[in-house]
Amino acid sequence: MLTMMPNIFLISILTLIASIIGTVTGFGTSTIMVPIISFILPVPETLLFVGIIHWFSNIWKITFFKKGINVKLVLLFGIPGLVVSFFAAGLPLILPTHLLKQLFGLFLISYSVFVFCKPRWKLKADSRNAVVGGALSGFFSGVFGVGGSIRSAFLSAFNLQKATFLVTSGVIGFMIDSSRLVQYIIGDTRLTAPWLFILLICIPISFVGAFIAKNFVNKIQQKSFRTIVLIALFLIGLRYLILGEIYL
């Protein structure tokens, strides 16, 4: 157990930071944690471990921002994401994904720069755009364990109020996470006893991170909030473009 203590401390700090960033921007928890945890655990166990923390992080998001929920958008975005994520999570984890990740990174960079240069632009919040965004989010969640960035790209394009943006992201993420976690477990992915112990520590830490983030979100203006999301999307896109094979 003593040899595990450094890992518990570092993973706890990682969880706290990822939870704060993930709550403020609507995404980032998995994107931050998966590449690092995958250096310690095999990819399937990494996706299960981080997926469970992400699942709880979405619950905290829903709890803190529930007044802004848009049921129609949640259903249009979430149901396609739920279905696609379930099947995508069953795909082999050794797919040649490097090029796909780089193209994904290029898309996020191009999108964030475009919207930053044209701050009044927004995507029409219609059924088609919501369904497409949900399906793409579900695909990236299932295959890579990170779908929040594509979800936030579509949601930010609708220029939603920050509470609506975050709770919608949280509900949709919760649905998609539930789907892919079931698929991981069906595929016989399990965590060993030490990692179950670490998980029990990290879950309440993710709540603390979300609570800290909530207080920060309440203090920032709507325009500044969208800018923060765009900067985060740009940085994540850069990470995928340059470091496409940091894991998987």
Image (cartoon, helix red, strand yellow):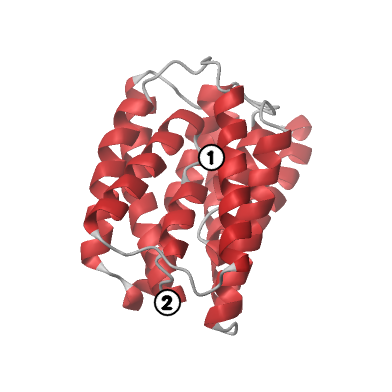
Q: Which residue is mark 2?
A: 161
- Between marks 1 and 2 in the image, the one whose residue lies nearer the viewer: 2
Residue 155 on image: x %, y %: 41, 61
Seen at 42% across and 48% down, the residue is: 55
Seen at 31% across and 53% down, the residue is: 129
In the rendered image, the vertical position of residue 229 relative to residue 104, given as above or below: below
Q: How many other residues sit within 10 Å of disc 2, few (<14), some (14-19) or many (≥20)?
A: some
In the rendered image, the vertical position of residue 87 relative to residue 210, given as above or below: above
Residue 71 seen in render: yes
Q: Is residue 79 left or right of residue 231?
A: left
Residue 156 on image: x %, y %: 47, 64
Q: Is residue 47 left or right of residue 185?
A: right
The total number of labels drawn is: 2
In the rendered image, the vertical position of residue 247 relative to residue 222, given as above or below: above
Residue 201 seen in render: no
- Tell me the distance, in whole angstroms, between the alpha carbons under discs 1 and 2: 28 Å
Question: Dividing the picture into quarters, in which one does residue 42 lie?
Answer: top right
Which amino acid type is shown beneath numbered disc 1? Val
Which amino acid type is shown beneath numbered disc 2? Gln
Q: Which residue is mark 1?
A: 50
Residue in the foreground of this view, choosing between 162 and 123: 123
In the rendered image, the vertical position of residue 3 relative to residue 239, given as above or below: above
Seen at 47% across and 56% down, the residue is: 152
Q: Is residue 215 left or right of residue 11?
A: left
Question: Dividing the picture into quarters, in which one does residue 60 lie?
Answer: bottom left
- Is disc 2 placed on a helix, strand or loop? loop
